Image (cartoon, grey):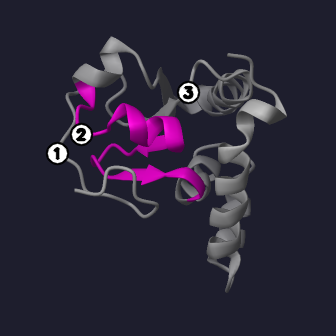
Amino acid sequence: MRAAGRRGVEAPPAKASHMDNSAVLIYDAECAMCRASALWLMRLALSGGELEILPCRSAPRRLRFPHITDEACMTAMQLVLPSGRTLAGADAVPELLRRIRGLGWLATVFALPGARPIARRVYARIAKNRMRLSCER
C-alpha cells in the first residue's frame, strides 16, 4: 500500500465520525505554519460542515485512520474523503478548494495541462522546508 504516495489512495472505510459527510484533513500540528493553515481552512469550510481536522500524531487519528502512517502525514497533509479515499499533499488541494464556498472555482486551475505536476513540486519544496520557513520545534 502506498500510504505516503502523492496520488489518491484507496483506503479501508474509516469509522464514522460525528460529521459523516465531511472530509478529514490530517496535518502536522507541531508545525506552526501547518497548524495555522489547517485552522484557516477549517474556518473557511466550517459553515457547511465540509471539513474536520485532526493532528497527525493524535490518538484519534491513529484509531480512525490506522492506514495513514505518521511518516506519511508528517511528509504531506492527508485528506480523507467521506468515501475513504485519501489524497496527499498537492493532490488534496483541489478537493479542499471545492469544500470552501467561493473558492471552488480555483480547483479548475489544477485541471489545466501541466498544473498538477507543478503544484506537486511546489508543495513538496514547501513541505520539505516548512521548518525553516516558519515552524518551531
Q: Is residue 42 left or right of residue 52?
A: right
Pair 3/1: label in front: 3
Q: Looking at the rendered structure, which numbered label has been put on residue 28?
A: 3
Up the image or down, 90 lies above or below 25; here it is: below
Residue found at x 58% / y 47%: 96
| Distance from Cα at disc 3 to Cα at disc 2 | 17 Å
Question: In which quadrant is the C terminus drawn?
Answer: top right
The magenta region covers: 64-90
Residue found at x 67% / y 86%: 113
Under tag 3, what secondary structure? loop
Marks 1 and 2 in Cβ contact (< 8 Å)? yes
Image location (x, y in percent) of residue 94: 60, 58
Residue 77 in view, yes or no: no
**Type of amino acid at the residue the image marks with label 3:** Asp
**Type of amino acid at the residue the image marks with label 2:** His
Q: Is tag 1's residue or tag 2's residue first in the polypeptide sequence?
A: 1
**Type of amino acid at the residue the image marks with label 1:** Pro
Up the image or down, 106 lies above or below 24; here it is: below
Q: Looking at the rendered structure, which numbered label has been put on residue 40?
A: none
Residue on which disc 1 sits: 12
Residue found at x 31% / y 38%: 68
Q: Is residue 130 magenta?
A: no
| Distance from Cα at disc 1 to Cα at disc 2 | 8 Å
- Foreground residue, 14 or 123? 123
Under tag 1, what secondary structure? loop
Image location (x, y in percent) of residue 56: 45, 26
Q: How many residues crowd around disc 2 within 10 Å: few (fewer than 14), some, or many (20 or more)?
A: some
Q: Is residue 118 left or right of residue 85?
A: right
Residue on which disc 2 sits: 67
